[in-house]
Image (spheres, rainbow, N blue to C red):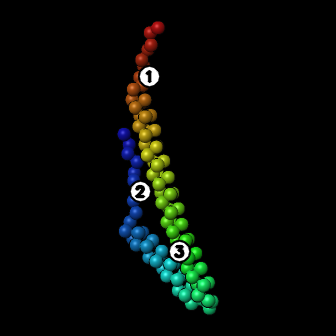
Amino acid sequence: MNKPIQPTQTTAYYIQSVLSFGLSVAAVAIGVAYLPVSGWIRAFLTVGVLYVITSAFTLAKVVRDRQELSAVTNRVDQARLDKLLAEHDPFKVDNP
């Protein structure tokens, strides 16, 4: 049975992703902190940014879970097909 190749990520890709996320959050935080507006507007923008960040994490988790579920379903379907093909004998003659 062929086992599908598991996608892997390099350490450099992981570090780049973490640094990019940290840099973007820091840039938005600095931008909100230096806006020439009142504290209530800053607080509103901060809560909005935190909401976007948590929503992005939730979306990423949902997409990953759906992808993993489809991979498991595909493996089960493939195992059933492999079993049917292994049991099938094209040269078998049924005598009535």
The residue shown at (41%, 69%) is 14
Dot 2, how many residues are within 10 Å of its Cα: few (below 14), some (14-19), or many (20+)? Answer: few
Q: Is residue 41 left or right of residue 16?
A: right
Q: Where is the N terminus found, in terms of image quarters?
A: top left
N-terminal of the two: label 3 or label 2? 2
For the residue marked with disc 3, what is the amino acid?
Leu
For the residue marked with disc 2, what is the amino acid?
Pro
The kind of secondary structure element at disc 1 is loop
Q: CA distance from mark 3 to mark 1?
A: 62 Å
Q: From the viewer's perspective, is residue 30 above or below residue 75?
A: below
Q: From the viewer's perspective, is residue 1 above or below residue 43?
A: above
N-terminal of the two: label 3 or label 1? 3
Q: Nearer the viewer, residue 76 or 45?
A: 45
* Foreground tag (1 vs 2): 2
The residue shown at (55%, 76%) is 47
Q: Quadrant of residue 42?
A: bottom right
Q: Is residue 45 left or right of residue 69?
A: right
- The image's mark for residue 90 is 1
Q: What is the x, y in percent for residue 33? A: 55, 87
Q: What is the x, y in percent for residue 92? A: 42, 17
Q: CA distance from mark 1 to mark 2?
A: 36 Å
N-terminal of the two: label 1 or label 2? 2
Query: Which residue position is annotated with label 3?
Result: 50
Q: What is the x, y in percent for residue 7? A: 41, 56
- The image's mark for residue 7 is 2
The residue shown at (46%, 43%) is 73
For the residue marked with disc 1, what is the amino acid?
Pro
Q: From the viewer's perspective, is residue 46 above or below residue 70?
A: below
Q: What is the x, y in percent for residue 15? A: 40, 72
Q: Nearer the viewer, residue 44 or 82?
A: 44
